[in-house]
Amino acid sequence: MPKVVYPGSFDPISYGHIDLVRRGLNVFSEVTVAVARNEGKDPLFTTAERVEMVREVLKDTPNLKVDSYGGMTVDYVHSVGASIILRGIRTISDFEYEFQMALTNSHFADDIEMVFMMTSSKYAFLSSHFIKEAVTLGGDVSAFVPPLVEQRLRERLVDTSGGS
Ligand code: ADP
């Protein structure tokens, strides 16, 4: 079985990501969730925090590895001897972005295949970006992220405001 890497920002991990991991494991014998450092995207959580949340919420998932990386995804994928990149698609805009990325990746590494899974309909609208916005505005995101992640989001986005 080829080795599979599921890369992303995971800032933070949501039930949409978790659903994709579980479905990936229905198809592949092992999946590595690879948290991209992505400093350029100004993440809310540090790489170590994002990795720790992924590890914690997926700790009972067999055949799953969690790692982090910097630099180009294809270089990381080569470095771990993998040949498949797993990504999810929710919307037309995801499709356009992923399509461009797949073509760019194939330019740099034509031995790596990208495999895309459509979102499950109940998570189609879920994105880390809107989850963070909802928490900031006082919304209940318990349907979108596991309890640990919700707690970390509140600590980072609500409890620090100090109130005035
Ligand atoms: P990136 O910054 O690399 O896009 P994300 O953490 O936002 O990182 O997403 C990682 C991958 O997970 C992407 O392929 C994205 O489309 C997919 N993904 C995120 N949320 C969902 C969801 N609700 N359903 C399906 N796929 C998703």
Image: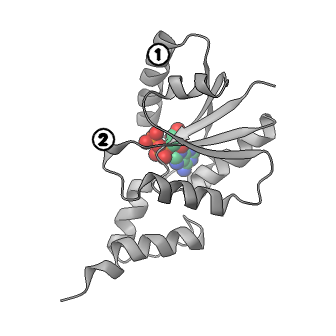
Kindly tell me whether residue 83 is visible in this rendering.
yes
Is residue 13 positioned above or below 89 on the image?
below
Colour scheme of the rendered structure:
one colour
- Residue 161: percent from the left, percent from the top? 26, 80
In the image, residue 32 lies at what x, y percent? 66, 40
- Of 80 and 50, nearer the camera is 80
Q: Which mark sits nearer the N-terminus, 1 or 2?
A: 2
Residue on which the image places disc 1: 103
User: What is the three-letter code of the residue carrying label 1?
Assistant: Leu
Which residue sits at x=56%, y=59%?
52
Specify the amino acid type for callout 2: Gly
Q: Which of the labelled discs sits on residue 83, or is there none?
A: none
For label 1, the SS is: helix
Asked whether the viewer can see residue 90, the reply is no
CA separation in Å, label 1 and label 2: 21 Å
Quadrant of the image occupied by residue 144: bottom right
Picture disc at residue 40: 2
Residue 92 in the image: above or below residue 104:
below
Question: Would you call the spot at circle 2 few (<14 residues within 10 Å), some (14-19), or many (20 or more)?
Answer: few
